[in-house]
Image (spheres, rainbow, N blue to C red):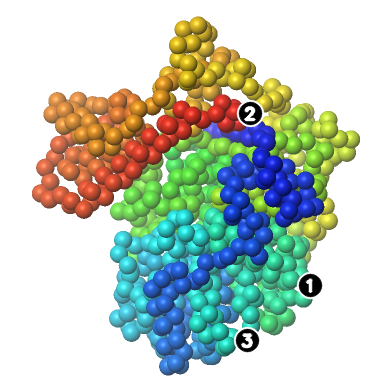
Amino acid sequence: MTTPTPLWQIQPPTQPPTWLIQLIKKNAPEIPGHYAAQLLWQRGITDPHILEGYLQPNLYKPASPFEFGQEMHSAIQRLLEARKNNEKIAIWGDFDADGVTSTSVLWDGLREFFPQENLTYYIPNRRTESHGLNRPGIDQLAENGINLIITCDTGSTNLDEIEYANQLGIDMIVTDHHTLPENRPNVIAIINPRYLDSNHPLAHLSGVAVAYKLVEALYLTLPNVAKKPLEELHDLVAIGLIADLVQLSGDCRYLAQIGIQQLQKQTKNPTRLGVGYLLEFCQRNGDRPTDISFGIGPRINAVSRIHGDSSFCVELLTSNDAKRCRELVELAEIANSRRQGLQKDVLFSVKKQLEKIDLSTTSVIVLDDPQWEAGVLGLVAGQIAQEYGKPTVLLNTETSVNSEPLARGSARSVNDVDLYKLVKEQAYLLHKFGGHPFAAGLSLPVKNIPLFREGINRQLRQQGSLSGPVIKADLIVSVAELGQPLFRELKLLEPCGMGNPIPKLFIQNCWFENVWHKNIQDTKGRKIQYIKTEFEIWDNSTKQGFPGLWWGHYKEEIPTGRCDAIVELDFNAFKGRYEVRIIALRTSQETPEFKITTQDDWIIDLRSNLQAKEAISACIFVEECPKSWDELQYWCRCAQKDSQKLALAYSVPSKLQPSEIWQELLGVAKYVSRVEKLVNRYQLTQKLGISNYTLYLGLNCLEKIGFNIIQTEENLHILCSDIPEVNAEEINYSLEKFFAAIKEDEFRQQYFYQVPISTIQGLVIGS
């Protein structure tokens, strides 16, 4: 099975309002501002009241840590009590970059208020302990006289371990950002942004940012105690935030911005020696988010991926011993080099397995192998998910628990699929799991893998099919436009991340010269089996090529003729030059020369003039209002495939009444269960006027009131089964979700009735 061809979505040029361009020039007078304004406008960042704070962090007003309410007050009160009573405190962290920086922030921050001999930290071993609290670790801390454990980037769902600590007389403060349990754990405080409204400026904080807010609250409570300024923690916060791929909006964006300002200082007069050495080894200046995402972050993460134990990374980030810091950076560099080679090997092996799979019938990729290095499975799963457009679960099957073979691995999401919920539905098959909507870690008995694979695929199919891999380009540029002026405009949107991705540039009808590849080398000059290809990109707009590279690809993979390319523009501090990174390539023959299509070109809008349909022939008509972009893309592809025009010929969608739709669904269920007939899923969604996912929620409601539903790919078999008790609270909760989804369907249908033709064209140009 070959890699699926991704759908290219090219955003057509838009003309942002003059006031937006003027506002940008006010904050950045050295740039023209047109491209930056176009990006901001396309991404909906258009409120003039928040734009200046978005562009200039010194104009942003961050939220107080006490907006976490009583949980933060309780945590501070317990810390003051511990300080007064000279108690021993342990910081329980995690082994990834967010967890390590969280631990480092608490370690450095609390040392300003507590004697160091009363503080310790514990980071689980990735290989032997996995994420979260565990009893052996708690026992070890109890033996050392610990009175209080503060978790960071973990702990929210470790209810059994929390109770165990309580039994040993250890109090617990949880700082975390992962999924919440159904009931509040028995802790002194749980500071987790998931308790806040989704629009709250603190809602998307990562683990390190939550830990920082706890320290900030302590600084505010005891303003005259600390000797070091709070600002010295900002670089650690930025590293954890950007490495953890959280949505960089609100306080997340602000903390990342001021953190990068602090990070820049570490290359000249470092206040944090380990960070300075990390920047030196990865040949970065510290002024870009990519210095973290491609430089510091992978090196911190590599330590636990290769060695299991990442505790020394906290020492690396907080020590003032120059010799020791340099030794530790060299160890991290070697680990990262080895990680790159292992990642390439596992990726190759995964793709060999994928050749034997029918991806057309696969919604979630689930693969396993006893030889795969567990530490790199998350990275490879992310690569596969992006390349194939499907959530991916990769498992290593070499371990065992109580003599039972156990598979452990990682999962990564794509296309806005909530991976945590997807995995949680299969919890009865799992040994352990945890994570968030974009990534998860899990373990399960090897014998359960086939059931897990079947179950998670069925679960996603019930929610609606995926459209496959999609690559979106934000701007259309020529090679002549690449360079410093464009780079400065794009940099204005930094830091980029979830919700604000790095701008991708579409270059059409280009070609490549001076193409060559090589293995990268480690610090000792040894080759690593990880390839990068370097080149010059050309087009008709210039008489000089522009440098670039393509990570993980050989020179033979670059076509020799004319191409279309999607790239990212970057600055290489080591070489002192601007360059592009290839995201995707295709031959120019796949599509005609790019132009912005118009209404008269191939899409006909009859939505406000349905009578005109009679006068049109040789056209594909869309007569039902689409409920999703996938549905609209389908019709556009049909028109393009048959070289026909597409006519939008649907009337104003009717209002959806949730209670009436529920009664109709209930009536269908009663009828088909009585006559023992199958009901076609697609026909049912059309009859009710709802989406696949909304139907899935409706079927959940039916199951809550006693129906037994057997689902196949196309049909439903609904049976009426008596159950002794029904939980009214659960039924009401399920109905609320179903009704909310119906209203969302109504909103979407109203949107697709009004969506401009230019927006639809932007969706499918280049597809």
Q: Is residue 658 above or below residue 231?
A: above
Question: Disc 2 residue type?
Answer: Gly
607 on left or right of 678: right
Name, please, the residue furthest toward the right.
Answer: 543
Q: Are marks 1 and 3 in contact (CB under 8 Å)?
A: no
Question: In whole angstroms, how far apart are the C-alphas of marks 2 and 1?
Answer: 46 Å
Residue 105: % across, % down: 56, 75
Residue situated in front as seen by the camera: 37 or 359? 37
Question: In whole angstroms, how far apart are the C-alphas of marks 1 and 3?
Answer: 22 Å
Q: Nearer the viewer, mark 2 or mark 3?
A: 3
Q: Which tag, 2 or 1, sits closer to the chain's start?
A: 1
691 on left or right of 6: left
Q: Is residue 129 visible?
A: no
Q: Residues within 10 Å of mark 3 (few under 14, many from 20)?
A: few
Name, please, the residue furthest toward the bottom.
Answer: 85
Q: Are marks 2 and 1 in contact (CB under 8 Å)?
A: no
Q: Secondary structure at mark 3?
A: loop
Question: Disc 1 residue type?
Answer: Lys
Q: Which mark is residue 227?
A: 3
707 on left or right of 616: left
Q: Is residue 21 above or below residue 233?
A: above
Q: Secondary structure at mark 1?
A: loop
Q: Which tag, 2 or 3, sits closer to the chain's start?
A: 3
What residue does disc 2 label?
Answer: 766
What residue does disc 1 label?
Answer: 268
What residue is shown at x 25% (from left), y 27% (from top)? Answer: 679
Residue 317: % across, % down: 63, 74
609 on left or right of 166: right
Q: In the rendered image, which quarter contains the N terminus? A: top right
Q: Is residue 290 visible?
A: yes
Residue situated in front as seen by the camera: 111 or 58? 58
Q: Residues within 10 Å of mark 2 (few under 14, many from 20)?
A: some
